[in-house]
Image: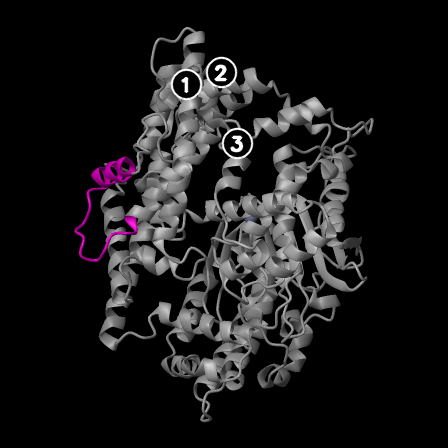
C-alpha cells in the first residue's frame, strides 16, 4: 500500500507500481485508426482490442474480452507502434512540434489499449494463463522501449525542437512536453558517444544481473533464516491460529512436531509484539537484522558493487552521483533538498523517539524486567503502553465504520462538499468481476467527467495492497476522458451481513480516491502530461491529502454511525481512535528516516570512491546523522533493502515522506483558509489536480499555497511537534 514506482519510458511501458498506478501503461496514445489496423478490419471483429471500445469513454468491453486476445493484440500493437515511430524518425521533412512530438503523442494506440486492460487484470484478477503471458511479455516490452529510446534519428529530431523551443511559439504546456521528451532521451543516454553507450550497456547488464541476484539471494535467505522452535511453550503469547500456522509451516518443510516462524521484509518483525519469551524474540530479531550479511546468500558484496555501478553510470551521463541523476526529474531536484528535508525533522523525531523509549523502559520495569530496552523488546512493551494509553477494542470501533456508509456518506460526501462532484451508479457498464461497481462522475454543473470502477474487496487472484490505475487516460488532443479504477483488499463481510472496516481501511479508501480524482480531474492536452504522471515524490501528495478529511468533524459525523442503531460514534471513542494513530510515531518516523538517509548516502558516492565495506559504511552513515540508536534500527538494512538496492527506489526512498509533507502542509493551509468549502476545493483542484505534469510541480504547489512547503504540519500530523515544544 501507498507505494509508487514511476519509471517512465517513452512510447513503451510507463511501469508504475504500488498504490498510485500499478500497471505498465502507455504514455502515448492515438485516436486515429492507422492503415495497418484498417487493412485487417475483419480481424477486429474477432479481437476486441483492434478497435477502440464503443462503450462510453472507451471503457473496456469486458463482455467480449478473453485471455486469448492479449498476445495477438500486444504483438500487433508493438509492430504498429514501431512502424509509427520509424515513420516519425525517417520523415524527410524538417522536424516540427507537429510532425514529431504530436505524432509521438498519438502513436501506440493499440498497444496502450491492450496494456492498460491486461496489466490491470494481472493485478486484480490474475490466473495461470495471465501470469504466463506476463512472463512472455516482460523481455518484449523492455526491448520495445529500448528500440524507441535508442533511436538516434528520433532523438535528433527531438533535440532540434528542444533547442528551438523558445522561438516556436509554443504555449507553456507544449514547451513542458518538449522538455519532458528531451529529458527522457538524454537520461537514457542519447547524448553519449558510441563507446560510452557500450560502457553504459555493459554496466546496465551487470546491474541487471546483480539486482536479480540480490533479489534471489534475499528470497532464499529469508526462507533459510526462518526460526525453528522445538517447544510450543516457547510460543507463549501467540494466538492458537498463529501457532497452528507455525506448525503447518514446519510440517511443510519436513519438520513435523516443530514450529517455524517466518521472517517478514522489514527489520522489525510484527510477531515481536506478542512473543512473551524474550530469548526467542532476540533470535527472531537477529535472524531478521543480520539477513544476507554472510554465508551462501550474502548480499554485502553485491550491494557495494551496485552502489558503485550506479555512481559510474551517473558519471558517464554527466552527473556527480546517482542521487544527482535520479533526483533531477523529481520535485526535490537535488540531493541537498532531500538531506535538508530529512535533517530538519530529525530533532523533533529523535526527541519523540527518546520519550517513547523512556515510556517503554518504564513499562519494562513495571513488568518486573531488569534490563535495558533492546530492539527485540520495543514493540512488545510498546503494545502494553498502547493498551494503557488508549485501551482500544478494534471490533467495537469497526461497528461504526460500515463499508457502504464510509463510501457513500464519507468519501463521496466529501467529494461533493469539497469539489461539487457526484457519483451515479452505472450498472449497465460491464466489469471484469462481479464485486466491481461502476460509477459515472458528474461535475457540479452536471457535465460528465469520468467513469470510475470501485473494486474494494479482497479475493483470490488479486495482488495485495491498494492502488489506483486507469483504463483510459485524459487528453484533449485525443479527445479522451478518464476511465479510472480504485483497488483495495477489504475482507468482505459474511454473506448477508454488512462489511465493517477498520479506521485504517477508512483512510485508505479516502487515499485511493485521492489518486482517483487526480486522474479524473486531469485537464491537459497531451497524454504524457496527464493526471498522475507526475514525479515519484509528488504522486502520493493528492492521495495523502484526502486521507486527512476522513477525520474532519463534518465529514466523520456524516458517516461514522453504528451499523445497527445508526448512533454516531461516541466522541470519546473517536478521540481515542484518532489519538492512537500518533502512537509510536517517533519510532516509525525515525526508522523510516534512517533508511532514507542510508539510501541517500549509498547513492551519493562518486565514481571515484572505492568499493565500500557494507557494515562499516552503514554504521558510519547512521552515526553521521545521529540516528544510530541501538533500539531503533533503520527500517531496512542494506543487505535486504530491496527498494534501494533492488533498484526501483534507489535514491528515492525519501519520496513517501516528501509527498506526505506536501499533503500535511496543504491540508493545514486549507484549514486556515476556511476548511471544507467549495472555494478551497476548486482552488486546490485547479492548481494541483487538473494540471498533472503540465508544469513543474513546485510551481504548481506555490501557485496553490503561496509559498514552498515546510515540515511543520507533517510533524503535527504525526503527533511529533507538540511533544517537543
Ligand atoms: Zn497512494
Name the mark on residue 719: 3
Q: CA distance from mark 1 to mark 3?
A: 17 Å
Name the mark on residue 22: none
| Mark found first going from the N terminus, 1 or 2 | 2
The picture quadrant where one finds residue 63 is: bottom right
| Residue 352 falls inside the magenta stretch | no
Name the mark on residue 358: 1
Q: Residue at x 31, y 41 (%)?
A: 638
Q: Secondary structure at mark 3?
A: loop
Q: Is residue 188 left or right of residue 660?
A: left
Q: Are marks 3 and 2 in contact (CB under 8 Å)?
A: no
Q: Is residue 86 left or right of residue 119?
A: left
| Residue 613 falls inside the magenta stretch | yes
In the picture as drawn, the residue positioned furthest to the top comes out as 368
| Mark found first going from the N terminus, 3 or 2 | 2
Q: Residue at x 59, y 20 (%)?
A: 390
Neighbourhood count class around disc 2 (C-alpha, 10 Å): few under 14, some 14–19, many 20 upward: some
Q: Can residue 403 be seen at all in this image of the molecule?
A: yes
Give the label, 1 or 2, closer to the camera.
Answer: 1
Highlighted range, magenta: 602-624
From the top left corner, tell me how far across and down residue 423 is, in percent.
77, 53
> Does residue 625 lie above or below 318 as drawn?
above
Residues 104 and 50: in front is 104
Q: Secondary structure at mark 1?
A: helix
Q: Is residue 661 left or right of residue 616?
A: right
Neighbourhood count class around disc 1 (C-alpha, 10 Å): few under 14, some 14–19, many 20 upward: few
Q: Can residue 460 be seen at all in this image of the molecule?
A: no
Q: CA distance from mark 1 to mark 2?
A: 24 Å
Residue named by callout 2: 237
Viewport quadrant of the N terminus = top right
Give the label, 3 or 2, closer to the camera.
Answer: 3
Amino acid at each position: 500500500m501507498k507505494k509508487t514506482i514511476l519509471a517512465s519510458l517513452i512510447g513503451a511501458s510507463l511501469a508504475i507500481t504500488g498504490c498510485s498506478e500499478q500497471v505498465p501503461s502507455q504514455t502515448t496514445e492515438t485516436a486515429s485508426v492507422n492503415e495497418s489496423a484498417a487493412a485487417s478490419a475483419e480481424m477486429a471483429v474477432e479481437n476486441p482490442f483492434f478497435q477502440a471500445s464503443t462503450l462510453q469513454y472507451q471503457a473496456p468491453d469486458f463482455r467480449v474480452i478473453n485471455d486469448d486476445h492479449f498476445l495477438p493484440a500486444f504483438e500487433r500493437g508493438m509492430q504498429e507502434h514501431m512502424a509509427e515511430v520509424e515513420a516519425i524518425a525517417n520523415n524527410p521533412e524538417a522536424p516540427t512540434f507537429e510532425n514529431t512530438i504530436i505524432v509521438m503523442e498519438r502513436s501506440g494506440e493499440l498497444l496502450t489499449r491492450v496494456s492498460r486492460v491486461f496489466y490491470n487484470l494481472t493485478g486484480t484478477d490474475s490466473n495461470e494463463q495471465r501470469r504466463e503471458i506476463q512472463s512472455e511479455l516482460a523481455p518484449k516490452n523492455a526491448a520495445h522501449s529500448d528500440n524507441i529510446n535508442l533511436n538516434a534519428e528520433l532523438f535528433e529530431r527531438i533535440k532540434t525542437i528542444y533547442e528551438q523551443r523558445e522561438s516556436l511559439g509554443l504555449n507553456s504546456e507544449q514547451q513542458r512536453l518538449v522538455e519532458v521528451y528531451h529529458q527522457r532521451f538524454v537520461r537514457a543516454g542519447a547524448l553519449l558517444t558510441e563507446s560510452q553507450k557500450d560502457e553504459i550497456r555493459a554496466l546496465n547488464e551487470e546491474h541487471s544481473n546483480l539486482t536479480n541476484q540480490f533479489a534471489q539471494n534475499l528470497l532464499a535467505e529469508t526462507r533459510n533464516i526462518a526460526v525453528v522452535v522445538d517447544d510450543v511453550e516457547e510460543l507463549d503469547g501467540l494466538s492458537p491460529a498463529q501457532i497452528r500456522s507455525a506448525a503447518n509451516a514446519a510440517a511443510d518443510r519436513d519438520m513435523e512436531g516443530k514450529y517455524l516462524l517466518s521472517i517478514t521484509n522489514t527489520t522489525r518483525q510484527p510477531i515481536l509484539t506478542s512473543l512473551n519469551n524474550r530469548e526467542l524474540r532476540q533470535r527472531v530479531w537477529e535472524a531478521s537484522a543480520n539477513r544476507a550479511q554472510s554465508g551462501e546468500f550474502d548480499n554485502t558484496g553485491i550491494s557495494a558493487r551496485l552502489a558503485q555501478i550506479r555512481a559510474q553510470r551517473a558519471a558517464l551521463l554527466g552527473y556527480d552521483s546517482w542521487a544527482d541523476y535520479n533526483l533531477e526529474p523529481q520535485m526535490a531536484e537535488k540531493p541537498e533538498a532531500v538531506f535538508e528535508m530529512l535533517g530538519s525533522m530529525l530533532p523533533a523525531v529523535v526527541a519523540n523517539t527518546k520519550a517513547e523509549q523512556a515510556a517503554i523502559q518504564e513499562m519494562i520495569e513495571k513488568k518486573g524486567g531488569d534490563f535495558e530496552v533492546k530492539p527485540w523488546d520495543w514493540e512488545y512493551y510498546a503494545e502494553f503502553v498502547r493498551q494503557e494509553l488508549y485501551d482500544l477494542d478494534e471490533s467495537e470501533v469497526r461497528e461504526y465504520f460500515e463499508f457502504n456508509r464510509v463510501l457513500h456518506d464519507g468519501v463521496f460526501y466529501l467529494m461533493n462538499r469539497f469539489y461539487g462532484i457526484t457519483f451515479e451508479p452505472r450498472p449497465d457498464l460491464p466489469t471484469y468481476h462481479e464485486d466491481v461497481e461502476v460509477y459515472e462522475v458528474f461535475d457540479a454543473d452536471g457535465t460528465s467527467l469520468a467513469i470510475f470502477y470501485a473494486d474494494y474487496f479482497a479475493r483470490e487472484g488479486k495482488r495485495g495492497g491498494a492502488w489506483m490505475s486507469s483504463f483510459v487516460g485524459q487528453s484533449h488532443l485525443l479527445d479522451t476522458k478518464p476511465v479510472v479504477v480504485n483497488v483495495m483488499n477489504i475482507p468482505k463481510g459474511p454473506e448477508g451481513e454488512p462489511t465493517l472496516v477498520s479506521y485504517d481501511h477508512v483512510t485508505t479508501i479516502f487515499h485511493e480516491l485521492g489518486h482517483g480524482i487526480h486522474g479524473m480531474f486531469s485537464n491537459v492536452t497531451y497524454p504524457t502530461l496527464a493526471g498522475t504522471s507526475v514525479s515519484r515524490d509528488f504522486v502520493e501528495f493528492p492521495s495523502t491529502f484526502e486521507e486527512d478529511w476522513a477525520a474532519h468533524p463534518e465529514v466523520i459525523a456524516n458517516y461514522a454511525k453504528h451499523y445497527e442503531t445508526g448512533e454516531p460514534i461516541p466522541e470519546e471513542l473517536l478521540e481515542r481512535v484518532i489519538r492512537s494513530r500518533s502512537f509510536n510515531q517517533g519510532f516509525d518516523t525515525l526508522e523510516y528516516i534512517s533508511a532514507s538517509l542510508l539510501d541517500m548516502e549509498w547513492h551519493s558516492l562518486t565514481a571515484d570512491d572505492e568499493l565500500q565495506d557494507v557494515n562499516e559504511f552503514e554504521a558510519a552513515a547512521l552515526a553521521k546523522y545521529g540516528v544510530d540508536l541501538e533500539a531503533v534500527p533503520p527500517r531496512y538494512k542494506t543487505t535486504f533493502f530491496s527498494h534501494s538496492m533492488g533498484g526501483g527506489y534507489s535514491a528515492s526512498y525519501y519520496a513517501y515522506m516528501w509527498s506526505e509533507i506536501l499533503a500535511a502542509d496543504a491540508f493545514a493551509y486549507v484549514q486556515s483558509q476556511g476548511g471544507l468549502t467549495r472555494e478551497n476545493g476548486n482552488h486546490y483542484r485547479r492548481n494541483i489536480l487538473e494540471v498533472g505534469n503540465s508544469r513543474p510541480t513546485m510551481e504548481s504547489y506555490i501557485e496553490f499555497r503561496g509559498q514552498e512547503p515546510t515540515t511543520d504540519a507533517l510533524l503535527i500530523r504525526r503527533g511529533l511537534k507538540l511533544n517537543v515544544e
